[in-house]
Image (cartoon, rainbow, N blue to C red):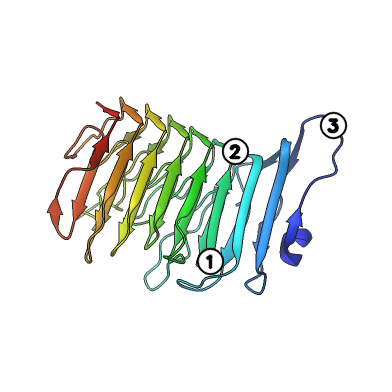
Amino acid sequence: MVTAVAAGGIITFSCGPAPVTITMTATATVSSSSHLVVLDGGGKVTLSGGGKAQVLFMNAGWEQQWPQLVVQNLTVTDAYSGTQQASGSSVYGGGAIFDEGGQLKVVNSTFSGDSCYASGPDLGGGAIRAVGMDLASPVYITDDTFTDDSCSNGGALSGLYANFDVINSLLTGNKAIGLGANPAQAGTPGGGSGGAIYTDGNQYDLSVAGSVLRGNTAREGGGGIFFVVNAGGGALRIDSSTLQGNPSAAFQDAPGIFDSVNGHDTQPVVTGSTVS
């Protein structure tokens, strides 16, 4: 698989009719020279990181348009990124998938028991970390399930300077396990926000539609969702969704949600949804 991903194009698996689990011993890296890479598990393939390996890595360059990475009909379990947050770098986090630049779509896939390094003020994405993405194309999370994933921030999903659309998905039992928030409080390593989803940056939006977030937890803010826009404006929109029982241990400004835009705590735009 590592060789196939490097070559690009549409990748499927010839593993027979029965479900199969493949344990990764190395991370598959998407070439920045590719235009389109599709990884299709056919609903039968599980990729395991064995608690040691990140599954997919793409670094196309900050806010580049291409490549487009599509992951579909796949299960990813026990993936892990041990990369720590470092000054001057944005390449950390994303236990299963790390993506800087280009476009990302994840469709009809399951992420379970994936994790990344347990501390760091802005380190996140137990399952997926997307940073510096093509802002004209939201990160599409569609018909996916995220269960029991964990990281310093963003137990399941983490974004930095990236628009996200989370559609018809289930996020449950994910945990932000860092401590000390961002910036890190004195004497702490930082982190602990966004039990399910952690996003940060300037002039971006997060949309959650037709989705369920339940039983996610954060040691700091936003047991379900942490959404901070530092400048330029943006909105957290929740439509036709259920957010229930996502406790925030330290701070929130709606049940299970911390929402701050341009330095001011605000409220998400909620339509046809239950937030409690």
- Label at residue 40: none
**Horizontal and vertical percent for residue 27?**
66, 57
**Horizontal and vertical percent for residue 254?**
19, 36
Side of 185 relative to 28 (left or right): left
Q: Is residue 196 above or below residue 6?
A: above
The crowd level at tag 2 (other Cα within 10 Å; few <14, some 14-19, many 20+) is many
Residue at the spot of label 2: 108
Q: Is residue 24 above or below residue 168?
A: below
Q: As shown in the figure, which amino acid type bears the numbered disc 3? A: Pro
The crowd level at tag 3 (other Cα within 10 Å; few <14, some 14-19, many 20+) is few
Residue at the spot of label 1: 102
Q: Earlier in the sequence, mark 2 or mark 3?
A: 3
Q: Is residue 245 visible?
A: yes
Instruction: Identify the residue at the far left of this view.
Output: 264
Q: Is residue 53 visible?
A: no
**Horizontal and vertical percent for residue 124?**
41, 51
Identified at 41% across, 61% down, the residue is: 85
Side of 18 relative to 83 (left or right): right
Instruction: Identify the residue at the far front of this view.
Output: 272
Given residues 239 and 85, the one toward you in this image is 239
Given residues 223 and 192, the one toward you in this image is 223
Residue at the spot of label 3: 17
Q: CA distance from mark 1 to mark 3?
A: 33 Å
Quarter in which the C terminus is drawn? top left
